[in-house]
Every structure is written in structure tokens, then in C-alpha cells.
Image (tube, rainbow, N blue to C red):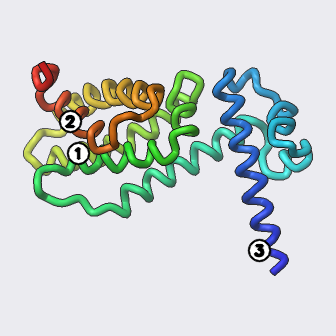
Amino acid sequence: MKSKKTDRRIKYTKMVLRESFVKLLKQKPISKITIKEICEEADINRATFYSHYSDQYDLLRQIETGLLSDINEYLAGYSFSDNGSESIQILQKIFEYVQENAEVCSVMLSDKGDISFQQEVMKIVQKQCISEWTKKSVNKELAEYIYSFAVTGSVGVVHKWLKEGMKQSARELAEMVINLTNRGISAFV
């Protein structure tokens, strides 16, 4: 029973440290954030911080690793059908995850986040998209170009969506991105 209390306390401490760190990361770049600031914001002493993380960069890496793991699990747990709407389903699932984790995702996917993290997220999506497209007789090289075009625009769309309070549903956003990718601006004008 004592270990469960300890586990709960550790989970709580890590959660508070992550939330405090994300709050600070919204305000300034990681290079300007000190351990002291994180601890003051979390109302945790420095020794407790150091018992879980070596520095603010380690905290960031652990947040990123958790998000990447969650995204992979989120997509792996979903069965994509063969009814022609796989791309919308994939994007919808990703946008739902982003929506559920909006605060941390808005920071991690912003210019204050880590570019390598953003690239890792894109690789996860790339693997799934290119796999689906090559099943439909699109050659791999063309699929990679299509993906590069689509993901660059999608990142901009997600930034705008998060910044403006996610007024559209994840499904609406997925359909918009797919329509823009498949038919371009002419799909809307």
C-alpha cells in the first residue's frame, strides 16, 4: 500500500513539474528557463526536481518521449478501414489527440518547441500516410513529395487551429486538410 502512495505522489510531482514547465515555456524559450523558476512555479523544492530530471532539457525530452509514445499508441489502437477514408481517419485521430492535449501540444508544436520533436511527430504520420498511399499504386517517391507538401501545410493549419481555440472539430479539420491536399484551393473557392 505504501508503494501506491509513493507512486501517486511521484506521478503528481511529475505532473506539476510538467505543467509548470509548459506554462513557463509558453512565455520564453527553454534556454531562459531556470530550474529555480520551474520549482517555484510548481511549489516543489529543487532536490525533488533533481530526483526526477537532470535539468530542464531532460524534462523537455521526457515530455516529448511521452507524447511520441502516446501518439504511436493512439494510432496503433485504431483500425483503419479500406473504404477510401483512411487519410481522413488518420488525421482525425491525430487531431483528436492534439485537441485532448492542446496545452502541451500548442507549446511543443510552436516555435518555442523543439524542432526535432516536431520532425519525429511528422515521421510517425509520414510512415502511416506513405504506407496507405503506396497501397493505392502511388510510387514511393511521389508519395514522399505529396507527404512533404501536405505536412508543411498541415502544421500551419494545426498552429492556427490551436491558436484560435479549436473551433472546428477534429473531423472538420481532417476533411479540410485532405481536401486542400487532394484538390487544392479550388476545393473551397
**Mark 1: amino acid:** Ile
Q: Residue at x 16, y 44 (%)?
A: 133
**Closer-to-camera residue (119/184):** 184
**Mark 2: amino acid:** Ile
Q: Residue at x 80, y 62 (%)?
A: 9
**Mark 3: amino acid:** Lys
State the image coordinates of residue 184 (x, y, percent, origin top left). 15, 23
Q: What residue does disc 2 label?
A: 178
Q: Earlier in the sequence, mark 3 or mark 1?
A: 3
SS assignment at label 3: helix
State the image coordinates of residue 23 (x, y, percent, origin top left). 68, 33
Q: What residue does disc 3 label?
A: 4
SS assignment at label 2: helix
Determine whether label 2 and label 1 are within 8 Å by CB: yes
Q: Residue at x 71, y 29 (%)?
A: 24
Using the image, tell me which numbered label, if any, was put on residue 65: none
Using the image, tell me which numbered label, if any, was put on residue 88: 1
Query: Are there few (<14), some (14-19), or many (20+) residues within 10 Å of tag 2?
Result: some
